[in-house]
Amino acid sequence: MSPDRTPVIVGIGLSDYPKAPHLTHYGHQAQAMKRALDDCGLAKDAIDGFMTVGQNGAMLDDVSTMSEFLGIKHRWAEGQQVGGSASENFVDHASTVIRSGYCDTVLITYGSDLRSCKHRMLGLTGEGRLEGPRGWEIPYGASIVSNYALTARRHMHEFGTTPEQLAEIAVSTRLHAANNPMALNRGPLTIDDVVNAPRISDPLGRWDCCVISDGGGAVIVTTAERARDLKQKPIYVLGAGSALTHWNMSQMPDFTNSGAAIAGPRAFAQAGVSPDDIDTAQIYDSFTITVLLLLEGLGFCKRGEGGAFVADGKLRPGGALPVNTDGGGLSSSHPGMRGIFLLIESVLQLRGQALGRQVPDARLALACGSGGMLSCISAVILGKERP
């Protein structure tokens, strides 16, 4: 019989977060890699595929330099510059190269010292060169926050979405963070707190925006055959999908629709499940509006109905769809690109290892990353059982 090359996640590791002034972005990835190897019981020389995102976006030299630093001897190496969706995209690609036999065990890493080295926060204030579409945005005050504020305001205009509905996303995330001792912000947060907070870029206020942290992670993907000899029960990669609809905000086709409407159906079709089957979702939350738009695009509710969908507490602990159970980017950690945290939390939930924030009997989890200005969306569906 041929070996079972079904792709599975067998090892996960988080570096010290949300504050780690003792670590560079190299140190975050090294620490996370070691913890992921210890988690599953693999030796480093078993890794023959490597995928990573650099501190400020992955260029080829980032991949080469990081693999050299970590001591990875790879047959397959890959870097991307699609922001917060890169790790989910990597799982999709790792599954393909494993199924096809290009390599057997892929290490995916990300790490950032964004909080401790704030001078590296490139692009947050709209600084940089003005070639191409950026020349039509930055001179008019465009920044990451203001770009997302445009989508929030448009959603409010078209569908009647309210600040209170967006605030519910921040509050539900904070309730999850209260159960994560590592989360940066764990204190009480109310709807009124969010609505009445100082505006960062109207209509988004302080608590509609993600925290800034240090941190990183590592995920190891291998074959179901190899997983038989390892420490952890495998978590199966059931489906994945990605979509890149634009990069610059001025080129976004529709401010109330994202590539999740393409990536989500692809992932669900491949997995053979529907949104109603998902027990917990880890959804990129750079801003509250990000979650709302991704929920709609993924098919958890119809377009324009995201506000009503979240308003009754569905996303909270014990709700019908617990979202961002580690506290998310809004309350726990956001080191610049948070996609790998979504994967790791999904695996912890499916293993039953999420401690005080465990979703009972979780069998299917979705991780959806968002990169750029809602530009590149990647969704991965993970399962406790084989397809």
Image (cartoon, grey):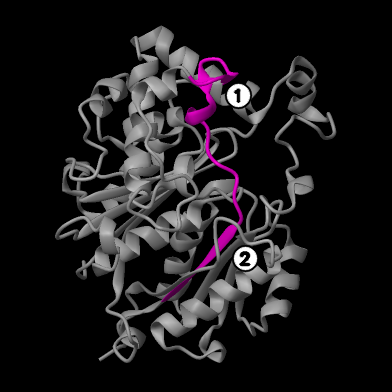
Neighbourhood count class around disc 1 (C-alpha, 10 Å): few under 14, some 14–19, many 20 upward: some
Q: Quadrant of the C terminus?
A: bottom left
List the residue tagged with mark 2.
Answer: 78
Q: Is residue 213 located in the magenta-colored stretch of the structure? A: yes
Which residue occupies 48% across, 82% down?
A: 37
Observer-side mark, 2 or 1, equals 1
Q: Nearer the viewer, residue 347 or 80?
A: 347
Residue shown at 22% from the left, 42% from the top: 321
Q: Tell me the residue at 74%/26% (across/down).
A: 133
Return the x and y of residue 377 as percentages of the image width and height.
Answer: 47, 42
Q: Which mark is drawn over residue 93?
A: none
Q: In front: 280, or 106?
A: 280
Q: Quadrant of residue 318?
A: top left
Location of residue 213 with respect to 253 vertically, above or below: below
**Amino acid tagged 2:** Glu
Of residues 178 and 105, which is closer to you in this image? 178
* Residue plotted at (52% across, 22% down): 205
Residue 231 position within the rendered picture, expressed as x and y whole percent measured from the top left: 33, 86
Instruction: Name the residue carrying label 1.
Output: 147
- Is 147 above or below relative to 101? above
Residue 296 occupies quadrant: top left
Tell me the quadrant of the picture where the N terminus can be found.
Answer: bottom left
